[in-house]
Amino acid sequence: MRISEILDIKGHRVETTWPSRSVGDIPRLFVNRNIASVVVIDAGGRPVGIVTDRLLIRALAEHGMDTINFTAKDIMESPPPSCAPTESVAHVLDVMTEKRVRHMLVMDNARMQGIVSIGDLVKHRLRDAEMETRVLRDAVMTWRRL
């Protein structure tokens, strides 16, 4: 399965913010939208970074309550991890594991197509495994009847 197929199922919506957004506003955005990352974009709408719940916790651990005075630009990962829509789910899962990231932008010719999380990809891998198990079980049952 390709990343583009995952986006076709889950949608292409991406929550974005400006680099100047206060870090103090980001947890509320996470809760209100039920998300764990937000893409930081420039004035042209191009992604320049990503702020995740993990990065927010890291900033709090390193800077304490001073983090509340930071902006998204101060704590974002830049450039954001990304993949192409043509890449396989298996490959992107490997990259996410290697880089220890849970969110990847899907970029096609410098245009943001969506975002995938490790949860999105694992969910689809589990569905594939369940389907494979059913097919094998049916094949065994058919073979036994012969």
Image: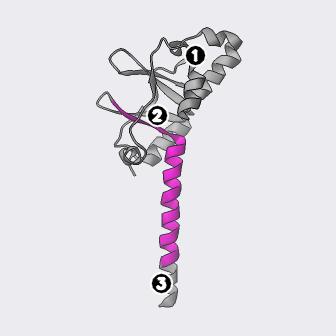
Could you give the CA–CA distance between mark 3 and mark 2, rounded to whole angstroms? 42 Å
Residue labelled with disc 2: 104
Q: Is residue 116 magenta?
A: yes
Residue 26 is left or right of residue 4, and the answer is right
Tell me where the magenta segment starts and ends, as one range. 112-138
Magenta segment main secondary structure: helix
Residue 81 is left or right of residue 45, and the answer is right
Residue type indicated by callout 1: Val
* Residue at x 56%, y 16% (from the top left corner): 75
Q: Which x, y percent locates residue 44?
A: 32, 17
Q: Is residue 117 magenta?
A: yes
Disc 2, SS: strand
Disc 3, SS: helix
Which mark identifies residue 23? 1
Q: Which x, y percent locates residue 98?
A: 54, 36
Residue labelled with disc 3: 142
- Mark in the foreground, 3 or 1: 1
Residue type indicated by callout 3: Thr
- Is 17 drawn above or below residue 5 in the view shown? above
Whichever of labels 1 and 2 marks the residue nearer the N terminus, that label is: 1
Residue 48 location, quadrant: top left
Direction left: furthest residue: 109
